[in-house]
Amino acid sequence: MAVNLNDAAYELEKVLRQTDEYKQLAQAYAEVNADPTTKGMFDNFRQIQMNLQQKQMMGQEITQQEVEQAQKTVALVQQNPKISKLMQAEQRMGMVIGELNKVIMKPLEDLYGVPQF
């Protein structure tokens, strides 16, 4: 019997979209996008995040000024209840995906063992 991993992955995607965690994330995201001021704050926050991640991936140094700007932006967006709710929902969704990743990686761990750090 041949196993089609793509079919299983798409089925997992469907199931994931039906979880409470995903539904709460989608609702929180919709609430942020429905408020132009909040959306602008969130978009700015995301842009700063992406810029810093891109610099890290390219091996570029992140300046103290950039770190301070990011910290100020995080503090500001966390004060916004809609963005705070969205960030909490993102964390919960991240935990779900982390658990799924553990399950997916189990065959390799069984084969190679768990890495010791």
Image (cartoon, grey):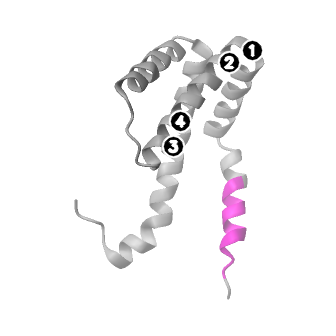
Tell me the number on the disc at residue 54: 3
Q: Nearer the viewer, mark 1 or mark 4?
A: 4
Residue bearing mark 1? 36
Callouts 1 and 4 close, C-beta under 8 Å: no
Neighbours of disc 2 within 10 Å: few (<14), some (14-19), many (20+): few
* Kind of residue at disc 3: Gln
Q: Is residue 69 magenta?
A: no
> Residue 99 at x, y = what percent?
47, 52
Count of residue discs: 4
Find the magenta span and give its range.
3-13
Callouts 2 and 1 close, C-beta under 8 Å: yes
Which numbered disc, 3 or 2, marks the residue that appears first in the sequence?
2
Callouts 3 and 4 close, C-beta under 8 Å: yes
> Residue 114 at x, y = what percent?
30, 67
Which numbered disc, 1 or 4, marks the residue that appears first in the sequence?
1
Distance between mark 3 and mark 2 Cα atoms: 21 Å
As helix, strand or loop, the secondary structure at mark 3 comes to helix
Residue bearing mark 2? 40
Residue drawn at 59 percent across, 30 percent down: 47
Query: Would residue 19 be found to the left or right of residue 33 on screen?
Result: left
Query: Would residue 109 be found to the left or right of residue 90 on screen?
Result: left
Callouts 1 and 3 close, C-beta under 8 Å: no
Neighbours of disc 1 within 10 Å: few (<14), some (14-19), many (20+): few
* Kind of residue at disc 4: Asn
Tell me the number on the disc at residue 51: 4
Distance between mark 2 and mark 1 Cα atoms: 6 Å
Residue drawn at 56 percent across, 34 percent down: 90
Query: Would residue 63 be found to the left or right of residue 105 on screen?
Result: left
Q: Residue furthest right?
A: 34
Which numbered disc, 1 or 3, marks the residue that appears first in the sequence?
1
> Residue 74 at x, y = what percent?
47, 20
Q: Give the dominant element type of the magenta stretch: helix, strand or loop.
A: helix
